[in-house]
Image (cartoon, helix red, strand yellow):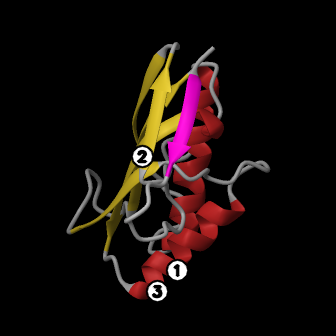
């Protein structure tokens, strides 16, 4: 069983939606490839919609975690890539992550959010990769 600890050291700004430091020991490390907004039939969900694409990307991340015997609570590090990162897009992303999927909101993890020009597929707006430990 992994021992995961979230740490927010003094002297750093209060985090909103993430944790500054995560330690993990005593388990198996799981690396989840970037998950975008494609459904199981390889159809894009939510063309042009950051909120809908974030929901689908997170749904896919949860499915990938479950396939390895993990849940969002096991995530120790994530990287989120967002095309066209504006305040509105960030708001849509944050709302989708707070709502989560199937009762599992994205937990605070050591996370990096990056605005990018483009992802692997032309209309994909959001991609999330993660490292988890069980």
Where is the C terminus found, in terms of image quarters? top right
Is residue 34 highlighted in magenta? no
Identify the residue shown where x is 41% and y is 52%. Answer: 111
User: Which residue does the numbered mark 2 point to in the structure image?
Assistant: 21
Query: Tag 2, which secondary structure?
Result: strand
Q: Which residue is drawn at 29% across and 54% down?
A: 121
Alpha carbons under labels 1 and 3: distance apart:
5 Å
Nearer to us in this view, 2 or 98 = 2
Span of residues in magenta:
3-7
Residue extending farthest to the front is: 10
Question: Is residue 114 left or right of 101 when viewed as pictured?
Answer: left
Viewer-side label of 2, 3 = 2
Q: Where is residue 34 in the image (x, y as percent from the top left)?
A: 38, 41
Q: What element carries label 3?
A: helix
From what the image shows, is residue 46 above or below residue 134? Answer: below
Marks 2 and 3, the one that precedes in the sequence: 2
Please say if the residues under marks 2 and 3 sit with CB atoms less than 8 Å apart.
Answer: no
Q: Which mark is residue 88?
A: 3
Disc number for residue 132:
none
In this view, the residue farthest toward the right is 103
Disc 2 and disc 3: Cα gap in Å? Answer: 27 Å
Q: Can residue 88 be seen in this view?
A: yes
How many marks on residues? 3
Using the rendered view, name the quadrant where residue 2 is placed: top right
**Residue 91: which numbered mark, if any?**
1
């Amino acid at each position: 069983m992994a021992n995961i600890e979230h740490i927010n050291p003094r002297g750093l700004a209060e985090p909103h939606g993430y944790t500054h430091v995560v330690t993990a020991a005593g388990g198996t490390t799981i690396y989840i490839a970037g998950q975008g907004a494609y459904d199981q039939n390889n159809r894009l969900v939510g063309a042009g919609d950051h909120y809908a694409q974030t929901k689908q990307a997170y749904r896919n991340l949860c499915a990938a975690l479950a396939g390895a015997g993990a849940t969002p609570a096991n995530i120790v590090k994530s990287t989120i890539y967002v095309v066209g990162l504006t305040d509105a897009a960030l708001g849509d992303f944050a709302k989708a992550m707070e709502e989560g999927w199937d009762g599992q909101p994205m937990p605070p993890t050591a996370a990096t959010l990056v605005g990018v020009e483009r992802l692997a597929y032309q209309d994909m707006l959001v991609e999330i990769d993660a490292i988890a430990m069980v």
